Amino acid sequence: MSNIYNGVYSVLLGMVITLRQLFKPSVTHQYPYENDFEINDNIREIPVGFRGQLHNRVEDCIVCKKCAQICPVDCIHIDARKPEKGGKMWESMNVVHLKDQTRIVGIIDGKPPKKIEPDMQFTIQHANPEGTTHPDIPAGATVKISGDKVDRIIDRKKVVLFMDQFDIDMTLCLFCGLCTEVCPTECLTMKDSLEGIEYSEFDRENLIYKFADPTLYK
Amino acid sequence: MLAQSTASEERKFLELKPFSDEMVVSMGPQHPSTHGVLRLELRLDGEIVREAIPHIGYLHRCFEKHAENLSYQQIVPFTDRMDYIAAMNQNWGFCLAVEELMSADPKFAGVPERAEYLRVLAGELNRIASHLLAFGTYGMDIGAFTPFLYAFRDREKILLLFEKLCGARLTYNYIRVGGVSRDLPPGFLDDVREFIDYFEPKIDEYNALLTNNKIFLERTVGVAIMDEAMAISYGATGPNLRGAGRKWDLRKDEPYSIYDRFDFDIPVGEEIPEAGAVLGDCWNRYKVRMDEMKESVKIIRQVLDGGLPDGPIVAAMKAIRPPAGEVFSRSEAPRGELGFYIVSDGSVKPVRLKAKSPCFCALSALQELSRGLMIADIIAIIGSIDIVMGEVDR
Ligand code: SF4
Ligand code: SF4
């Protein structure tokens, strides 16, 4: 008799607990139709420092290969070469990122300011005599740009090596983050945004990220 | 050579010679209740299991051999992939071993105080997450689907905390040789406190939901008794040993890190005659885990109340280059004692590394445990010894 009582009681107790849950909001999201990140009352921000996809701001990369050395699965392939004898070797340079997502590599007059005000004027000596790093600015030209167009200015260190290849095979990557920790210029980062998380591709080739940009040097 | 390999191939599939009215059934490797890729070869007499032989190796990734070609820092992310449910504790176990090797080096100053606290915080949170998964999937194996959803709802909260702490949800790579990789993000301790305040009453809810449920009791009480002597002879540790009534926990008995500063109990299995529970049965192994979650909450609360000391989070050192020698060090992971044996020749890479996995030992007892029981009980046993195949196979 007590056996029956116990059985019924414990089942009912479980029912009560689940019944209480019935009146609470649902915690399940129907991804991808219902995006976790967009639902209002259950907003979940991707935390700062999330280890998503890798990204390299190549203009800051000094090709030290530290990242390729520490990578446990050897998924970073770097190829670099010394400048030819007599060839021009770029000293430190500035990379001016404009607000329309383009950039100019060159040397600006004076030191880059800490904070960019809209009324500032920058004179940029376009560093590349043969090619161009910006679609509208001819090679070797000197241009004046006002501060309201400029997003940020980065000081690039002295270029000792030219980067020919910088590939990261994201299909092999462990997302361990070791490479971003050793990078001395902190140009190799992991995206902590939605695009660092959602990146399915149909073609494996698209997951091999090629960061090398020859227009930066020639 | 060829003949030999063919013979062994044959053996692989016909290890058991059935008697005339018996049959051999292969269970797994893709079976939801085998917790990974485990294949069991069962010799059945009707529904009664005469013999169950586990075949392992489906997740073998040559961790130990691979580690010989990697520097100590590079091995840490690979330990994440051993027991991926409790990756923090795996990181920690490995780092403890390397630090023990390094302690012979006078230049190594030891792990900073703050890092020790961060490790305890992360390790205990991960223990809760791991036991939650064990609880949820065990319920599901036995046929109760609700606990699974409840456990995952709360485990998700821990994963969100870890995501803030170290940027990853499963493979943390957080605990490093000599410290931890990142300091606390702002507001993290408040989040942890909020979580444990929320979580502590939930344990009682789980107990009402599953632990004391009549159907669950019928399935687990008195089933597959692994008594203390048997547990010790198989080398089973952790909740499996404590469920058999032996009060043995490295955090108390051989305190590593700063566990000697905290006040917590070690739950052990108990005999409950009216329910029929005996030491070392499935129910007791399971119950120990539920009680351990409470103790982990206690430890986390003490860390939060005591406050974390200031200071560096990683020991200053040029390169991780332990002096020549060998070490065996063990720590208490959620699934038992995790041991690492490392031989160093003074270079940046280990000469030999061996991981002693608690799940492997627990799984080896399966054969003896399951003899003479029903097929359905095998599911109950696998869930109650709580194995993770990533760690069994490495
Ligand atoms: S995050 Fe990826 S690329 Fe970077 S070190 Fe780890 S495995 Fe290599
Ligand atoms: S560590 Fe940083 S600077 Fe060095 S090669 Fe890699 S990305 Fe470039």
Image (cartoon, helix red, strand yellow):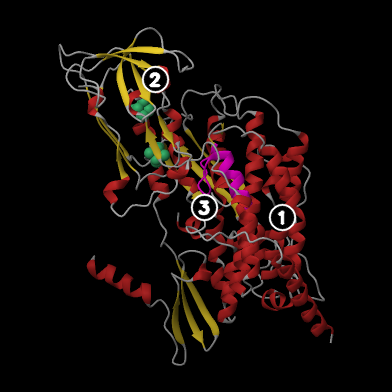
- Residue A165 lies, with reference to residue B362, above or below; the image says above
Q: Secondary structure at mark 2?
A: strand
Type of amino acid under label 2: Ile
Same chain for labels 2 and 3? Say yes or no: no
Name the residue located 59 percent from the left edge and 66 percent from the top edge. B137
Task: Reply above or below: B57 against A48.
Answer: below
Could one spot residue A155 in this view of the protein?
A: yes
- For the record, the magenta segment spans B157-175
Residue B76 in percent (x, y) is at 48, 41
Q: Residue A77's x, y, as percent?
A: 28, 36
Q: Earlier in the sequence, mark 3 or mark 1?
A: 3
| C-alpha distance separating marks 3 and 1 | 19 Å
Residue at image point 19% right, 16% down: A129
Residue B360: x percent and y percent?
52, 59
**Amino acid at the residue labelled 1:** Glu
**Chain holding disc 3:** B
Front residue of B71/A95: it is A95
Residue that carries the numbered disc 1 in the rendered image: B292
For disc 3, the marked residue is B84
Mark 2 lies within 8 Å of ligand 2 (Cβ measured): no
Q: Secondary structure at mark 3?
A: helix
Q: CA distance from mark 1 to mark 2?
A: 52 Å
Residue B239's quadrant in the figure? bottom right
Q: Quadrant of the C terminus of chain B?
A: bottom left
Counting the numbered discs, the total is 3
Count residues near mark 3 (Cα–Cα under 10 Å), then give few for <14, some for 14-19, many for 20+.
many
- Give the label on residue A154, or none: 2
Q: Chain of mark 1?
A: B
